[in-house]
Image (cartoon, rainbow, N blue to C red):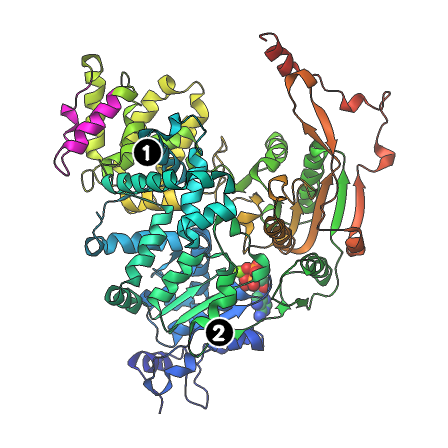
């Protein structure tokens, strides 16, 4: 007997669903027909268990290579579930970035067609951190935290840890105690890998092992001060969520809110994230995860590929494992080259892919003289492709670290070509943006010392001393008692202080409607900007941009949370990010390019020292992760892939030695034996190079900056 719920019946009447002979509904024919049999199996897996009223959906793992349709399959599965009666509000979809979550929501909306119009199809689509923040605010009262908690980004966390480090007197030790960044990395590694401090120190930070006892007391103090200030850091979001769902009854309640939990890019999750999923769905009912072990690129943040490999065995019977082997993204020559790069990896589980797009050009290895030529070459190629009809948006320039794109950015600006940069220095890391956010955050949570300390020093006449005094005053006052106006500040600073105090008080929850509160803060800050900064103009533009972004959020809390967790990716270009309907080139770190694809992809600096990064050649594991990074970069390309190899790099040395060039070798991940997979090109072609009279002339660099410094030595 078919469990014919009212919803399904209604849907049939409306002619939305095809009801095959066996009696249970599938998604509309045209939608499902585009999928291959393996994808179809993944989309429909377990959904037939709804027959007979049984609400069991056994756990499923889809493990497959790049571009095989994992994300598409997940979107189809969500649409199929909704078609079969699942409530969109009961679907939890976890993605790697907010951008990916938005894209997934849109995709599901498109798949569902007009039915989804007007309603957000997936209210619970987001990143692990974003969803954690929402759930923790909702359940705050049940787990003993204040729902108005602030969230500290990595920089704030390191600063707070540093205060604790000073407070405990560790910074004054005769022998050098680890710096704040290292302390935070150790703390974060312990939490995210769920491994004991001693072991983390031995394996990853052996030079800090002698400080184990001090580190422990430092972390204790750090946790104490976070709690006193009602602050959670990134790691806390996952930790609290994991702990919350680890509490039997509460875990069942929260897990029970969601009929299905679906996770994309599962290879880049860590043990805490796995614990969260198991806490919510101990028997795996309704759990679907997809990923590719060959694309695991976040081990440096505690992600473990074991999560995906061990997933099936967590359940009894073990989770179903499905694989996909057809790639829909790239041409076969691009796939061949990428497959052979990853085939040299020490460990690998997913199989090679094949593509129907059998013909096409091989990827290019392009040798250029230096980074300046690299920038000129890439920009000219991008423009040539645009002339040939390929939009800028269908082209991307990828690089290992954000600094690698500096020359290209200059070249693009010079030629007035719009671009958006993902990854690297975020908009939010700019001092002026942090200032405005600190005021808003302090208004929301007066116990947040980091925010208060930063915000107060923006007022003329208030320095660190007065700021600390005010914070101590507030800390000893009754809860929720701010009374900023009456704080002990110097007489001379009083008028400016009064104006500021009123501004902060207005930012408190439910005081001034949103986004007016933010607009006011921005206006106040713009009035101060000439006093605070020597280069106010580009900063003014950023503040205006921030006000515009704020207006797209329903309230201060959502704005601050989401901005802290997943800041806007566009770089703080003076002109602001291009309008959405404009055409623009994508510049992205390889890490931020995860899950995406472009018709033409240029990978910068495919040389040793950049890929692999010279920071990562110390251990085999780090080196293997770099290999996977190159694989991720190459598999972003649909039709055209170019790896650029600058032959020389400019290195700044000690003033006395002047600057020099070092010669770079092709990345070790493309050894000689793999060269037949590529076309090779030298640019500019030798015939066009006008030989300088002195062959060394190009290398001669007059470092005037070094001379200036030397004047004072
Ligand atoms: P990655 O590993 O990079 O995250 P993925 O496995 O998630 O890749 P998708 O991004 O879902 O792959 O799909 C890659 C491309 O293939 C997309 O353009 C998608 O639209 C297309 N595609 C996937 N399945 C099919 C199909 N059955 N028919 C046609 N195109 C498909
Ligand atoms: Mg994907």
Q: Is residue 488 magenta?
A: yes
The answer to whether mark 1 is within 8 Å of ligand 1 is no
* Magenta highlight range: 466-489
The answer to whether mark 2 is within 8 Å of ligand 1 is no
Image mark for residue 43: 2
Q: Is residue 553 visible?
A: no
Residue at 31%, 30% in the rendered image: 167
In this view of the protein, which residue sits in the foreground, 480 or 519? 480
Image location of residue 226, percent across then percent down: 28, 41
Residue 138: quadrant of the picture: bottom left
N-term mark: 1 or 2: 2
Q: Is residue 220 magenta?
A: no
Q: Which residue is mark 1?
A: 164
Image mark for residue 554: none
Q: Secondary structure at mark 1?
A: helix
Image location of residue 577, percent across then percent down: 48, 38
Q: Nearer the viewer, mark 1 or mark 2?
A: 1
Image location of residue 126, percent across then percent down: 39, 56
Quadrant showing the C terminus: top right
Sort mark 1 into few (<14), some (14-19) or many (20+) by Cα contacts within 10 Å.
many
In this image, 226 relative to 307: left or right? Answer: left
Number of numbered discs on residues: 2
Q: Secondary structure at mark 2?
A: helix
Image location of residue 347, percent across then percent down: 63, 61
């Amino acid at each position: 007997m078919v469990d014919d719920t009212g919803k399904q019946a209604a849907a049939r009447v409306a002619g939305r669903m095809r009801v095959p002979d066996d009696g249970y509904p599938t998604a509309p024919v045209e939608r499902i027909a585009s999928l291959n049999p393996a994808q179809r199996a993944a989309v429909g897996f377990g959904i037939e268990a709804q027959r007979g009223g049984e609400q069991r959906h056994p756990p499923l793992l889809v493990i497959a290579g790049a571009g095989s349709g994992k994300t598409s399959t997940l979107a189809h599965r969500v649409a199929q579930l909704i078609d079969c009666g699942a409530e969109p509000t009961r679907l939890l979809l976890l993605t790697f970035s907010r951008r990916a979550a938005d894209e997934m929501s849109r995709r599901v909306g498109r798949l569902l067609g007009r039915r989804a119009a007007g309603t957000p199809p997936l209210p619970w689509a987001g990143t692990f951190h974003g969803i954690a923040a929402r759930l923790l605010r909702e359940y705050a009262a049940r787990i003993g935290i204040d729902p108005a908690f602030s969230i500290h980004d990595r920089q704030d966390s390191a600063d707070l840890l540093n205060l604790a480090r000073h407070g405990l007197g560790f910074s004054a030790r005769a022998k050098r105690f680890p710096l704040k960044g290292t302390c935070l990395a150790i703390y974060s590694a312990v939490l995210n890998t769920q491994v004991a401090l001693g072991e983390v120190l031995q394996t990853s930070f052996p030079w800090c092992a002698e400080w184990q006892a001090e580190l422990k007391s430092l972390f204790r103090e750090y946790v104490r001060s976070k709690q006193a200030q009602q602050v959670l850091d990134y790691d806390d979001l996952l930790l609290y969520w994991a702990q919350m769902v680890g509490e039997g009854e509460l875990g069942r309640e929260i897990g029970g809110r969601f009929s299905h939990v679906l996770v994309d890019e599962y290879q880049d999750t860590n043990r805490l994230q796995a614990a969260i999923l198991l806490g919510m769905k101990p028997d795996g009912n309704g759990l679907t995860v997809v990923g590719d072990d060959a694309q695991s690129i976040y081990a440096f943040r505690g992600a473990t590929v074991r999560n995906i490999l061990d997933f099936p065995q967590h359940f009894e019977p073990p989770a179903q494992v499905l694989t996909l082997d057809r790639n829909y993204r790239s041409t076969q020559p691009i796939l061949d080259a990428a497959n052979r790069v990853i085939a040299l990896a020490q460990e690998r589980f997913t199989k090679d892919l094949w593509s129907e797009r059998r013909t096409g050009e091989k990827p290019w290895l392009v040798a250029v003289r230096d980074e300046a030529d690299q920038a000129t070459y890439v920009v000219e190629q991008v423009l040539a492709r645009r002339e040939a009809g390929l939009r800028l948006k269908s082209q991307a320039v990828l690089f290992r670290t954000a600094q690698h794109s500096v020359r290209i950015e200059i070249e693009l600006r010079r030629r007035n070509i719009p671009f958006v940069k993902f990854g690297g220095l975020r908009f939010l890391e700019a001092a002026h943006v942090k200032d405005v956010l600190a005021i808003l955050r302090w208004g929301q949570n007066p116990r947040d010392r980091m925010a208060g300390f930063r915000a107060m020093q923006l007022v003329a006449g208030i320095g660190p001393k007065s700021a600390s005094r005010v914070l101590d005053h507030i800390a000893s006052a009754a809860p929720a008692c701010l009374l900023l106006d009456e704080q002990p500040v110097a007489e001379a600073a009083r008028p400016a202080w009064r104006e500021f105090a009123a501004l902060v008080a207005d930012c408190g929850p439910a005081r001034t409607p949103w986004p007016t509160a933010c607009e006011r803060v921005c206006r106040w800050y713009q009035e101060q900007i000439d006093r605070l900064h020597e280069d106010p103009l580009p900063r003014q533009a950023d503040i205006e941009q921030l006000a515009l972004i704020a207006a797209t959020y329903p309230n201060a809390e959502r704005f601050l949370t989401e901005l802290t967790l997943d800041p806007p990716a566009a770089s703080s270009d003076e002109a602001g990010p291009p309008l959405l309907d404009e055409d623009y080139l994508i510049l992205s770190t390889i890490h931020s390019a995860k899950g995406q694809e472009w018709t033409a992809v240029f990978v910068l600096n495919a040389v040793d020292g950049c890929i692999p990064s010279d920071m990562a050649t110390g251990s085999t594991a780090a080196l293997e992760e770099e290999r996977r990074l190159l694989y991720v970069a190459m598999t972003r390309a649909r039709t055209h892939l170019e790896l650029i190899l600058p032959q020389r790099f400019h290195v700044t040395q000690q003033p006395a030695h002047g600057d020099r060039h070092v010669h770079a070798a092709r990345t070790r991940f493309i050894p000689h034996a793999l060269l037949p997979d590529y076309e090779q090109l030298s640019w500019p072609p030798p015939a066009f190079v006008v030989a300088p009279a002195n062959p060394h002339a190009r290398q001669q660099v007059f470092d005037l900056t070094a001379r200036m410094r030397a004047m004072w030595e």
